[in-house]
Amino acid sequence: MRRREFITILSGAAVAWSLAARAQQSTIPVIGFLGADSPDLSADRLRAFRQGLKEAGYAEGQNLVIEYRWAEGHNDRFSAFATDLVRRKVAVIVAITTPSVLAAKEATATIPIVFFVAGDPIELGLVASLNRPGGNLTGITSLTLEVASKWLELLHELMPTTSAFALLINPTSPALAAIQSRALQAAARNLGLQVHLLEASTDRDIDTAFARLVQLRSGGLVISSDSYFYSQSEQFAALARRYAVPAICGFREFAMAGGLLSYGASIQDAHRQIGVYTGRVLKGEKPADLPVQQATNVELIINLKTAKALGLTVPLPLLGRADVVIE
């Protein structure tokens, strides 16, 4: 490492340590942030989160300190991270995945927790109700269950003669995986379709899952809404092209990277709302009284270029419902 680079890194660390020390000795609040992957992969989401904080009157490094903990795709790290943040007596814990919020909930019943989850927070045991959470947790839900059946319906509409599909889940997030699996299986029964279940929690697992997909002769793939899968959107798109697999995902990044379809809530908008809610809690509002908000900005993106490469003709009614068409 060059001397100048070392000095720059050391100076940045010194600033962070100084801010944290000042926060412990003054009224500057410190919040803990449980991240699923890494700062680089989360750059857009962090920018949206900070924008939400700004709207609530807080700016990192000025009147707020954020202690980040990055799991880098390893959900088993969240328990230790959450315990550490509780020990440090942070003012709020921000948890943006199902495994992280479950770990935070296990670690504390008193420190406010602001979350973003893809599943039903009531079914996950996070809140008593959406309107009156009733405990120390509140946040944003994309209510994936309401769009999960839509993933299968959209693929079926595009390939009406195909009877077998596959669903990819992350076994290291068992609560979310179970909920999404049940939703997809119910949708499959209603449509008279068969759904094979595939699992992946590493890059190698993803490669194996696509190879298995071909062996099963599944006509298409549904990629569940999982934080790890979000960070692997480009890998999914590349593999879908390589194996010529029609696939749909809940993240727009998948379709933008060359995947066939995406249908889901805006992740960036949800993170902005998390920032706003975090600011409101810092100002004294109680999570128990803040309704869980639903991410209602759901968009359908169709990659027409990919559809043509797969030899698929997108029906005009489906094309007309798309929010974005990539040609």
Image (spheres, helix red, strand yellow):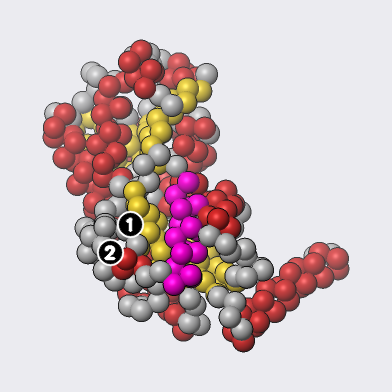
Instruction: Report if residue 5 is visible in the image.
Output: yes
| Nearer to me, 216 or 258 | 258
**Per the image, is 273 magenta?**
yes
Element assignment for label 1: loop
Residue type, mark 1 in image: Val
Q: Nearer the viewer, residue 119 or 141?
A: 141
Q: Is mark 1 in CB contact (under 8 Å) with mark 2?
A: yes
Q: Mark 1 points at which residue?
A: 292
Secondary structure of residue under mark 2: loop
| Boundaries of the magenta span | 269-284
Specify the label residue 133 is tagged with: 2
- Residue 80 magenta: no
Quadrant of the snapshot with the N terminus = bottom right
In percent of width and height, residue 319 lies at 39, 18
**Label 1 to label 2: alpha-carbon separation:** 7 Å
Residue under the image location 61 percent in, 84 percent down: 26
Residue at 19% across, 47% down: 182
Compared with 126, 322 (above or below) is above
Label 1 or label 2, whichever comes before in sequence order: 2
Which residue type does callout 2 highlight?
Pro
Q: Is the magenta stretch mostly helix, strand or loop?
A: helix
Circle 2 Cα neighbour tier, 10 Å, few/some/many (<14 / 14–19 / ≥20)? many
Q: Residue at 18% of width from left, 41% of height from top?
A: 185
x and y percentages locating residue 194 in the rendered image: 18, 33
Viewer can see residue 34: no
All told, the count of numbered labels is: 2
> Residue placed at 82% from the left, 70% from the top?
7
Residue 274, by quadrant, is: bottom left
